[in-house]
Amino acid sequence: MPDIKKPIISAHQLTKQYGNNTVVNSIDFCVQQGSCCGILGPNGAGKTTTLRMLMGHVLPSKGQLSVLGWNIPEQARAMRQYAGIVPQQDNLDPDFSVTQNLSVYGQYFGLSAAEIQERIPKILAFSALEQKADARVTTLSGGMQRRLSLGRTLINDPQLIVLDEPTTGLDPQARQLIWQRLRQLKNQGLTLVLTTHYMEEAERLCDDIIIMDQGCILEQGAPRELIERHIPPNVVEVHGVDLELWHQDVAAQFELHSETIGDTRFYYGYEVAPFLQALNDNPELRYLHRPANLEDVFLKLTGRDLRDD
Amino acid sequence: MINITELLQFRWIAVWQRHFQVWLKQIGAALIGNFGEPTLVLLALGYGLGHFVGTIEGIPYLTFLASGMVCSSVMHTSSFEAQYSAFTRMNVQFTWQGMLATPLDVQDIVFGEIIWAASKSLVTVMAIFIVAAGIGAILTWKVMLALPVLFLAGVCFASMAMIMTALAKGYDFFLYYHALLLSPMMLLSGVFFPVSQMPELIQHFVWMLPLTHTIALTRPLLVENTLPDLSAIALHLGVILSYAIVCLSVALKLLRRRLYQ
Ligand SMILES: Nc1ncnc2c1ncn2[C@@H]1O[C@H](COP(=O)(O)OP(=O)(O)O)[C@@H](O)[C@H]1O
Ligand SMILES: [Mg+2]
């Protein structure tokens, strides 16, 4: 059995190369028991590859990796008995109903019929799918399918769940429900590792954040820590007529760090009250004053340019 | 390579069970297909041709044809299952991906698929036997001995087919396999007429194919008072088994590479 004091996941110089292309570049990280770790990064950063290495589905080119005390990839098969995976793309079984999906999945884990039958009602309740127990999965909405994918991972009573973009493509209500369920699992002591594009949610749920870009880890730490390390606590977003003129004539004297994205200028500072006063004096400009957040850190570290490969 | 230790954990049975459960859901349609086709072919060809042919190598033509047909159905059923159906589960429905998230490994999945394909072809076999017995083409209970032989043949053909699945980008790829391998085997391996009727060169080639050996083993089992001689049994089984083991190993190697990048 895994040693409790050891981290649930520890990766050392973990690397994956496809030909000459280094997709994951010598990354080091640990995930502690009962914590939630969020991996953030632009498209192509290597998030999915990293998760797939954790599960033994991609063979690392270099480095050491242990998950739940098992050496990966050598012992991945044994490790997966105690883990759950929610993939980026749902792979529910279209030939079966909701309940059958759960029971067939339980069979893959070698569980007895009694164990499976005992867990199914709990999972249906957890996934809020009691009304759909006998519906074919192809008739479920996207949000319901995601909930079933998440619920399905509980069939083997896992210690660790790995989720690749669990909320991408869902409408806000469906997303909220997923995040709520993830919090519930975390409160029950499960360890979670997930990737996401939704910073504000990651900030709320994750104890640790890993920011990746081009296969490297740029930063890691608790969300609050990361924000304090990189961004002053106050952010003022300003837009309006003759913004640049005003910036040169008025704003420059406050000596705030700032940058422009599109038609908006972002000002970062510790003390912004006088600056806000100056803004109030100019009716042509509209502004939003808010605390610094993870998105600011993410954009600062990975750059503002759009990536959609 | 084949990992015997992991096979003996019998986790692959869960894969077989899954396919069986899906099959049960559409059992009606499946059985109509299984019984309908052989009935038609046996009646049309057996009575139609049989009228002119009479007997071949001392066997009534209806029996000759039934024994050939049962072997070629095994070949077609298990190839189809290990190609079109397995490819759908691998690349379209991502059922395999779901399985790989559990303690199942590529070998469990592939072996489960192959045993399932062989099982499904055995259902076809039984349907043909029942029809054939009904029209008097099967003359002995000894035919039951053909079941294990045909199951092994199903494993063999499914393993061969699985290599194509491992290499396939889409369904069209399987058409080559059917046109270039399965159809020639069906025509040359002694399903409709004896291999000995063909030019010697072709006979040499045909005896390298597993369908020929399957038919050679199965045909005498449908007829009273005949048995293949013992050394021939060993040779035929050896060929079928070798094809199965070599092709399974190759398919596993290719699929591990494909799925575990
Ligand atoms: N099997 C593969 N062969 C070659 N390159 C791959 C393969 N899988 C992923 N990549 C490349 O690795 C990079 C990282 O991909 P991925 O881990 O999916 O990123 P993310 O999930 O962060 O968007 C991408 O540039 C992708 O093209
Ligand atoms: Mg990804």
Image (cartoon, rainbow, N blue to C red):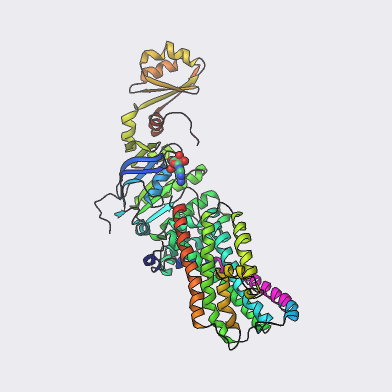
Look at 48% across and 16% down and name the residue there: A243
| Left or right: where B154 falls relative to B39 | left
- The reply to whether residue B60 is in sight is yes
- The reply to whether residue B17 is in sight is no
State the residue lying farthest toward the top: A249
Q: Which residue is at the front of the view, A224 or B149? A: B149
Look at 72% across and 75% down and name the residue there: B45
Q: Which residue is at the front of the view, B126 or A297? A: B126
Q: Is residue B84 above or below residue B27?
A: above
Q: Is residue A233 above or below residue A278?
A: below
Specify the segment rendered in magenta.
B22-45
- Residue A125: x and y in percent read 46, 57
Question: Image quarter for residue A200?
Answer: top left
Q: Which residue is at the front of the view, A145 or A86? A: A86
- The image quadrant where one finds the N terminus of chain B is bottom left
| Left or right: where B257 falls relative to A6 | right
Look at 55% across and 69% down and name the residue there: B210
What secondary structure is the magenta-colored segment mainly?
Answer: helix
Magenta segment includes A247: no
- Residue A224: x and y in percent read 33, 35
State the residue lying farthest toward the bottom: B225
- Residue A32: x and y in percent read 29, 47
Q: Is residue B252 above or below residue A22?
A: below
